Amino acid sequence: MYRAPVNDIAHVLKQVAGLEEALEQKRFGDLSGDLVDAILEEAAKFAAERVAPLRETADKHGATLKDGVVTTAPGWKELYRDWAAGGWNALTGAEEYGGQALPMMLSAAVSEMWNAGSIAFALAPMLTMGAVEALEKHASDELKALYLPKLISGEWTGTMNLTEPQAGSDLGALRTRATRNGDGTYSLFGQKIFITYGEHDMTDNIVHLVLARLPDAPDGTKGISLFLVPKFLVNADGSRGRRNEAFCASIEHKLGIHASPTCTMIYGDGTSGEGATGWLVGEENRGLACMFTMMNNARLLVGMQGVAVAEAAYQKALAFARERRQGRAPGAKPGNEMSPIVEHPDIQRMLLTMKGLTQAARSIGYACAHALDMARTGDGEEARHWTDRANLLTPVAKAFATDIGVEAASLGIQIHGGMGFIEETGAAQLLRDARIAPIYEGTNGIQAIDLVQRKLPLDNGEHVKGYIAELRAIVDQAAASNCTKLGDSAGCLTFAIADLEEATLYLQQALAEGRQAEALCGATPYLRLFGLAAGGAYLAKGALTSEDAGRAVLCRFYAENLLKETAALKHCVMNGADSLIAAGATLQD
Amino acid sequence: MYRAPVNDIAHVLKQVAGLEEALEQKRFGDLSGDLVDAILEEAAKFAAERVAPLRETADKHGATLKDGVVTTAPGWKELYRDWAAGGWNALTGAEEYGGQALPMMLSAAVSEMWNAGSIAFALAPMLTMGAVEALEKHASDELKALYLPKLISGEWTGTMNLTEPQAGSDLGALRTRATRNGDGTYSLFGQKIFITYGEHDMTDNIVHLVLARLPDAPDGTKGISLFLVPKFLVNADGSRGRRNEAFCASIEHKLGIHASPTCTMIYGDGTSGEGATGWLVGEENRGLACMFTMMNNARLLVGMQGVAVAEAAYQKALAFARERRQGRAPGAKPGNEMSPIVEHPDIQRMLLTMKGLTQAARSIGYACAHALDMARTGDGEEARHWTDRANLLTPVAKAFATDIGVEAASLGIQIHGGMGFIEETGAAQLLRDARIAPIYEGTNGIQAIDLVQRKLPLDNGEHVKGYIAELRAIVDQAAASNCTKLGDSAGCLTFAIADLEEATLYLQQALAEGRQAEALCGATPYLRLFGLAAGGAYLAKGALTSEDAGRAVLCRFYAENLLKETAALKHCVMNGADSLIAAGATLQD
């Protein structure tokens, strides 16, 4: 059963990703390292004792829809209630609306725990958090006063309504329309798909944030506005008013995250003829900008799902490998007894690959959260620097982590052998659940394009260079450390960082010279190269800042076994475009 | 909907894997190239019109067990009946028992089609084929006469009963016991798990081949005997006798291949007190040897499942990518129209990766089938050579192909975006179905160990060297061809083959010097290196022997984008063991 690796998490937060320094700088008021530890321990306890035990049964039951009402799995409602009562939903919310205003780093860390317990469960508050953020930044004071306290406490949940059948990655194509009612309210008409927790039975109201077009809006992405559309209208005194025309028409039958209802939502179904009543959030036609301000956090948190599922898969596979005996491992004691399969090198390779990639992705995610915290608590030049850093790391934190989540979950099945394919074992569910994360909140292909096209040019291309210099400084420290347990880590990392630098400069130049197609061809391999190299540097930093020799030997395994892939990826980026373009042309009708 | 790529299949069979030459040598009697084409066309027709249309509905219904009776999905029984009536089951069976004795190459090719239609369906005859082969080679004439005609026609199906809860990869641990009845028959008592089509409603008898131990058998793998245990006893005149004590106790709830019942079988459940009646196949205590003679074919056919599912995933994703429009691709015509996503470089990269790996794995599979055919139709030194070749290629054909099957199915989901995660789309099922193939018929880890420990030493280590020299000769031809569409294929392939050679020599030396643990550490990366390099050479051969420029540009994409991974894999093999061993030690309790 899953138990959060509190030591690893605390170590990466404080020593690798920068929390200790931030605490020393009193960035978060009187938050102390001890309090951080206490919060992590409490969250770990709740994740292990309450969330994880429901992962498999909730998957089996799933969510059901009948007459417009979604019933969640047995125990789900109570789990959510107790979780919110524990104050977990309010962790990062603004203090004036009842939140605890704790750092994003802590949010990322505990989010990893909820998701390792059950992605399907953690999704509900993740969406609420997105809604809270959008409202905090863009809503009127009146809307904030009416909705934020209950969204922050978790009494209500929030949803994000972007996708329509013809508008997925390309939101410019969306058609849901909104008309002005003249009284400050709007009426919405349209259909939204893939709405996570669009309808459920865990709270007595749901606050939908919906992207739609006004009648006189420009075409494309510049004509999209954001609206707040509650399931039940809210009276001025905060009490619940009439049912709004926001209904769940169907829920999807999905590969995984069965306990999370994925809804098709109909706004304005004609029951009143008036459409769904909504309130504008931010300015008209500026809805996408409102969404983008919360994208960083949401993408980071989806990245944490990748870390979480990889960690859960690793723990499950390790436990199995220690119990299961088959064959005799090299060097096994004389006798006829079969060896635990954890002693077989091939099983060890799989487990260490899972563990190393998990720790690498975790470090990147926390570093990204750190940047968000530094940007929020800094100002001027400093804030700009950390905003750039968060922007740079976000696509990597999302895509690298969710890719390795799938990879680790698949390796976890393999380690279980035949048992891994049997649903009762629970290893298969982790793959089923993991598989959504590279898709939603911007596909990993979109993340890679974002990294190359929008993030490499940040600060005239200097920001990423500064980041690479920081990674190199870590590697230089590793080289100077004379830590024999690190083996050739520094040597391997030096090559990997050089690969990252070369590929980066190449892409920056390609973009500068207008060779956009060529740069796009290399986007996905570049993102993985970035993640592998940065993650490797963080593993080295973790080893250098810890007494635990396990961190050094893991870093060494990662460096000497996994990191050479960067050379192949660099080759793809720098030499792969021509053949991709030539062969790609043959695929078209 | 799936349509077998008959042109590609025929081209790889004839021009790449050696069928044309074998036909010219009259290895298979009067089988002609035209007849091969006709058979492929017929099989493609049946796979497209009959098998593939049931893939998704059968997955949804699955197989159900009630009172010991397994009911397969609607239409399954009729599908199997018509398929067998078409003569497909008898393709490779011995002529004296009604078979067509056609080459294994053809069997591999049509097997790819059935599996691309539905792995769950194709499994039933795959197991029967294994049973036929074991009986043809090892059973008494009496058993052959009684069972082979109906197993070859497909009137009955066969099963293979190896696994027990404590005995998976390690068959030496099995406990099912057999006692001698004194009349030439045996009584079996025990439980077998993961028995594919152990019970079903498609035929009126099922012939189980069961591994068990005699009372006086030595411990371990040298004390295992093989028994034929029919569901219904068969009278001397071929009519059906009494029900035997071979019962299905439960069926598994699996991640995929839902339409294939995976049974727990109980032999000798006490209803008669006499156990299940069985007949010895081969000699007492030589059961494992009997199984191993059929392993090559079975492993190859599982490898074809990987090819098949990758091809099916590719076709589905390509069709979607041509239809689905999102965003604007670089170089899109002026205007506001969204581009089909097949025009986006990142989507092209995924599609071409799927296509290239599929073709590579297909080529390796057919080359392995060719070796089996050459061994069967040759004699003396020649037969020995081709037996070595089949032995060398079998683990690669199995493991490389099934790994890329999972990889391609996962990419297929990604290309579909959010729709890929919805079960109705059918992309998710391909991943669910694909995920078993790296596990059964010897896990891919076992295949890698087999390749390194037992296949590299073949012919005193010379056989693999000769094979690598053949691959290099292909690359030299590519270099000499001056085909501009091949780009730098020859250059990339030269490096890849050199990586393969270096890693091979390194492992051979490690084994020779008794550094077994070190060699085992590199087994899995070595197998993938082998598959990538060999597959690349076959793609080049395919390009050189074809007028179709598409083969050259695909080869180039593969060489310039995918093949650099070999350097990283070689590094793992040659430099990865120490860190793996050091870190592996930290995983143990």
Image: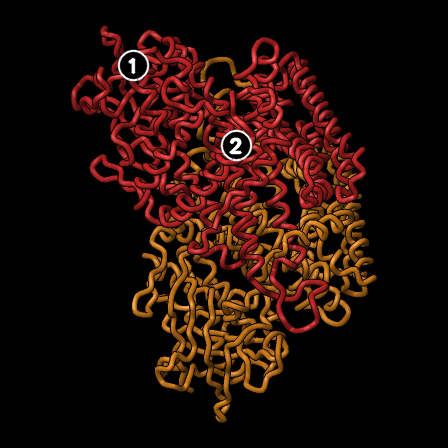
Chain colours: A orange, B red
Label 2 amino acid?
Val
Query: Is A31 drawn above or below residue A424 in the view shown?
Result: below
Mark before the other along the chain sequence, 2 or 1: 2
Determine which quarter of the picture holds residue B98.
Answer: top left
Would you call the spot at circle 1 few (<14 residues within 10 Å), some (14-19), or many (20 or more)? many
**Residue A198 locus on image (x, y percent):** 43, 68
Mark 2 or mark 1, which is nearer to you? 2
Would you call the spot at circle 2 few (<14 residues within 10 Å), some (14-19), or many (20 or more)? some
**What residue does disc 1 label?**
B279
Discs 2, 1 touching: Cβ within 8 Å? no
The chain containing the residue under callout 2 comes to B
Label 1 amino acid?
Trp
Q: Which residue lies at the image location 51% right of the left edge and 13% below the top edge? A: A334
**What residue does disc 2 label?**
B36
**Residue B521 locus on image (x, y percent):** 62, 27
> Is any atom of residue B586 visible in this view?
no
Q: Same chain, marks 2 and 1? A: yes
Query: Is B286 drawn above or below residue B431 in the view shown?
Result: above
Q: Which residue lies at the image location 71% right of the left edge and 42% below the top edge? A: B552
Closest to the observer: A125 or B19? B19
> Is any atom of residue A583 visible in this view?
yes
Tag 2, which secondary structure?
A: helix
Closest to the observer: B549 or B117? B549
